[in-house]
Every structure is written in C-alpha cells, then in structure tokens.
Image (cartoon, rainbow, N blue to C red):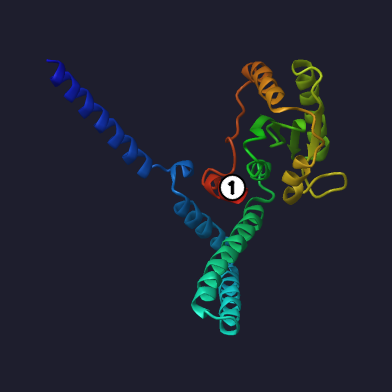
Amino acid sequence: MASEKAKELAAKQKAEVKAAKLAKKNSTNPRDWPWHKQIWQTYKVTAEVDKQLNLLLAASFLGVTVIGLVIGILLPPWWMWLILGIMGGLTAALWVMLDRAKKATFTRYAGQPGAAEVALGMLDTKKWFYSPVITATKQLDIVHRAVGPGGIVLVGEGSPGRVKTLLAAEAKKHEQVAYGVPVTSIVMGDGEGQVPLTKLADTIRKLPRKLEPSQVTDVKARLRALDAVRPKVPLPRGPLPSMKGANKAMRGR
C-alpha cells in the first residue's frame, strides 16, 4: 500500500513539474522568458522605431571583429585574436542594441499619459520599488511613486499647474503616513523646472541617500495603509505591457 501511494505521489509531482515547465515555456510574461528570448524581443521592438539599428549593430560587430583580426595578423596566433574579436564584436553589438533600445523606448512613449513608468521601470528593482498611477484626474494628470534609498519620490505628469496641486496633496498624505521620511516631488516634462523623461531615472538615482534597505521595507508597509483607502484609478496600470522584458534587459540582468 505504501509503495502504491509513493508511486502516486511521485507521478503527481512529476506531472506538476512538467505542467510548470510547459506553463513557463508558453508564458507571455517576459520575466519567464530565457535571456535570449528577452534580447530578441528587445531587438524586435527597438527595430520598429529605430531604422538605423541594423546598420549600427553590423558596424559595431564588424568593427571590433576586424580590429581583432588585424591584431592577430600582427601578433600570431591569428585565430585566437579572431575569436576574441568576434566575442568582443558580439558584446559591442549587444551594448549598442540596449543603448538604442532605451532611446527607442523613450521615443515610442514620449508624450503619452503614464510615460513616466518607462523611466521608473529602468530603476534597480533591488533598491527601488515603484507604483505606477497611484492617483490621477479625468484630465489625465497622473502621479506615480517610487520608494528607495532617496526616500519617497512622487512623479507627476500632465498640466504643470494641476500636477503641482496634485503633487502637493499627495506629498501631504505621504508625510502623514510615513512620518519623518523625506518626500521629493518631481514634475516630468520639458519645461523650466521640470525633469525630461530621458533624465527622470538618473535624477531619481542621484537623490541623496536617506533610507537603509530595512527602512525602505518599513516605509512600503506603511504606504499600504494609504493605498488601501484610495478609490480605484480609472486608468490602465501603465503604458508598457509588452516592454517589461526590455526594461529588465536594459537594467542589466
């Protein structure tokens, strides 16, 4: 009897493992994809916007490979330098692709409501935690939030006048819940005193360190109480349902 039960349990576990592998293989979530599939998806999305991508990739790969070959001719054995050149060319091409992918992402979503999430998604997820569209108005004035070493960062986008009022109200709420934690308000845009989408992530990263990792976790817990009483935001949770894998690749896996 015990042997039969053991066999049934083993068969059940084997079936569960097989089902999990199949689900991961067919998953549409980029987090479940292998690294090569993430890179391929990044390439396809970038190539749709960046028409010079293929030329730049070829130039970077061939340029470094040729340099390796020339060195090999001068300093035998040539085949070793050729292999190193090819490896270096692939690395250079990958670097170029990720750099162009970042720029293409900004180009694709610049000016769209919720575009700040593009930059927030490029933050180091081991240090920063972000919540897109924590509040919004019918006029598409939006506030996002990031929590990390620099404290609480509120990012507003939309009409500058309305956004400043919305940010001020949100800053007051956050200061009441996370007492003593610095709250920084940023208006995203291209006007005076605003931070462009392309510089948003770097601006947040460069904020002075205010919180330790354990404090960040505590602040997140306190903010859950604030989020729990919010009305449902009548907007999609972000503009990039298909770009998460690209953002992850650009952050560095």
Q: Is residue 26 visible?
A: no
Give 108 or 65, whichever is nearer the viewer: 65
Lateral position of residue 232 relative to residue 12, left or right:
right
Residue 134: x, y in percent?
66, 29
The residue that mark 1 highlights is 247
Q: Is residue 185 above or below residue 229?
A: below
Identify the residue shown where x is 36% and y is 44%. 25
Q: Residue furthest bottom?
A: 73
Give 66 or 168, whichever is nearer the viewer: 66
Q: Is residue 164 above or below residue 63?
A: above
The kind of residue tagged 1 is Asn
Instruction: Please rate how many residues cluster around mark 1, counting C-alpha atoms within 10 Å: few if below 14, some from 14 to 19, many from 20.
Output: many
Identify the residue shown where x is 75% and y is 19%. 178
Secondary structure of residue under mark 1: helix
Lateral position of residue 4 relative to residue 131, left or right:
left
Q: Is residue 221 above or below residue 166?
A: above
Give 122 or 228, whichever is nearer the viewer: 122
Residue 41: x, y in percent?
49, 54
Residue 243: x, y in percent?
55, 47
